[in-house]
Amino acid sequence: MAERITMQVARYRPEQEDAPTFQEYEVPCPEEWVVLDGLNYVKDRLDGTLSYRWSCRMGICGSCGMTVNGEPKLTCATFLSDYAPGPVRVEPLRNFPVIRDLVVEIGDFMRKLVRVKPWIVRDDEKPVSEGEYLQTPQEVDEYKQFSMCINCMLCYAACPIYGLDQAFIGPAAIALAQRYNLDTRDEGAAQRHEILSEHEGIWGCTFVGECTEVCPKNVDPAGAIQRYKLTAAMDSLRSLVMPRGGGAQ
Amino acid sequence: MAKRSLEPFLWLLFSAGGVFAALLLPSLLFLFAIAVPLGWLAPPSYEHLLGVLRHPLTRTVLFFLCSLSLIHGAHRFRYTLYEGLRMQHLNEVIVPICYGGAIVGSLWAGYVLLYMR
Amino acid sequence: MSGPRTASDYHPRWYRPYISTYWWLERRSYFAFIMRELSSIFVAWGVIYLLLLIRAVSRGGGATRYQEFLAWSVNPVVLAINVVTLGFVVYHAITWFNLSPQAMVVRIRGKRVPPFWIIASNYLACIVISAAILWLVLGGGS
């Protein structure tokens, strides 16, 4: 087991350079250290000017997504010793503009997330006095997988369609829309349908499947998108054949 | 209501074509493009093949196979041009060529399967 | 959605790397994806080839056209193209079946069918149909 490992960290300081460069740091490599530990060691002891995002360090906040040796990863969930003897290359998350060093601009995803209305939409809310909404375990099962999304955006980094066309709504947004569409408490499927059916919505996806490969929470956004394509296509067919009838699904 | 787009229907046809192509094309092509030409299997006699082709069920299945597989191929190829060669800006040219070709091919398939002597 | 274009203390320039047109050569999974998408051309050729065969058999005038077609199908160029075509068509079928559980969720008596069985039933259907085709076509005498 190596005692130290070299980290090649991307630096980008817009006030002094036009493009990113790499800076090498040698950090200790105990068995239990993750890449984030390495970055924290750099910031605490070697170079306090390094900028990056992190928070919970346990894979639930979704802040620390970066590109490690070319792969989108959560740096708090990626062991340094897996890359021994190194070097480990740490770059900012792909397909997002880089603000500084390892920090990317995530506004695009945030705006798209709001557009798909990732909350329970109901025509009338039940008052608290009437008690809870009841769901069977099967009904929870329908959407549970998609509710595990931590908004880490690794799927956006992996998706080549998003890389080529930033207008594409993206895997996580669609998976989260599906999480609510499939929730029996929700009545907002029709509202989400309009956003999702745009050309840069679900129809931009060609099922590359990389999003599912990199998702740290096994959300399977590719599956969510394909299933929603079928739902949306059947709805379109139904509205064509029965313009007035059919009823909302 | 969002303005009606063709995408959902194209996708349904694409999916149906994908299923037909995946289930039927491997064996048909193995038989007639590889095994028979290479002599691994004796070619079916003319009379027998014509007899099988003439059957209305055969003609129906083959028509759906051909037309749906062509649309499947056209739809996928259109997106390959967008993504592989970044040709989105040419989509006003690509869409008619791809789906137009698929429609022409389907019409030809219908003609061949309908008019057998 | 695009960032501010001029640099200042409060609006630094964002760096946007350019995505090359050959992005799909950079990763094996991206390359496999583009190959899967290119199978579309070979699916189309496969259909055209079959239609040429059907036309040769059903156009009338006896077995001559059929014999001519068979002779043409042995032409090395045609054969080479068809070998590649079969490869891509099989690749299409394999990738299509393997992705099927993600495209649809099947429930039997309330319980989700595991993905393995969805994929297996697709392959089984393909084998059964292929066997039926071979039996149907080769059933007669030569």
Image (cartoon, coloured by chain):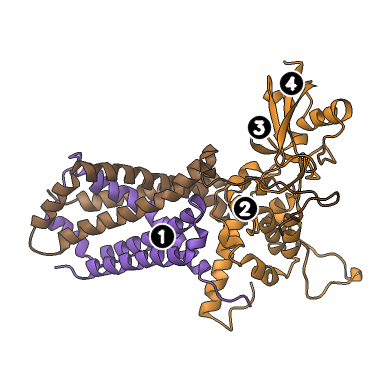
Chain colours: A orange, B purple, C brown
Residue at 49% across, 63% down: B11
Left or right, C108 with respect to C67, comes to: right
Q: How much space separates mark 3 and mark 2, taking CA atoms?
A: 20 Å
Is residue C62 something that shows in the picture?
Answer: yes
Residue A5 numbered mark, or none: 4
Q: Chain of mark 1?
A: B
Q: How much space separates mark 4 and mark 1, taking CA atoms?
A: 50 Å
Q: Earlier in the sequence, mark 3 or mark 4?
A: 4
Crowdedness near tag 4: few (<14), some (14–19) or many (≥20) residues, C-alpha within 10 Å = many
Q: Nearer the viewer, residue C107 or C73?
A: C73
Q: How much space separates mark 2 and mark 4, taking CA atoms?
A: 33 Å
Left or right, A178 with respect to C88, comes to: right
Q: Which residue is mark 2?
A: A162
Total marks drawn? Answer: 4
Residue A116 numbered mark, or none: none
Q: Quadrant of residue A109?
A: bottom right
Q: Earlier in the sequence, mark 2 or mark 4?
A: 4
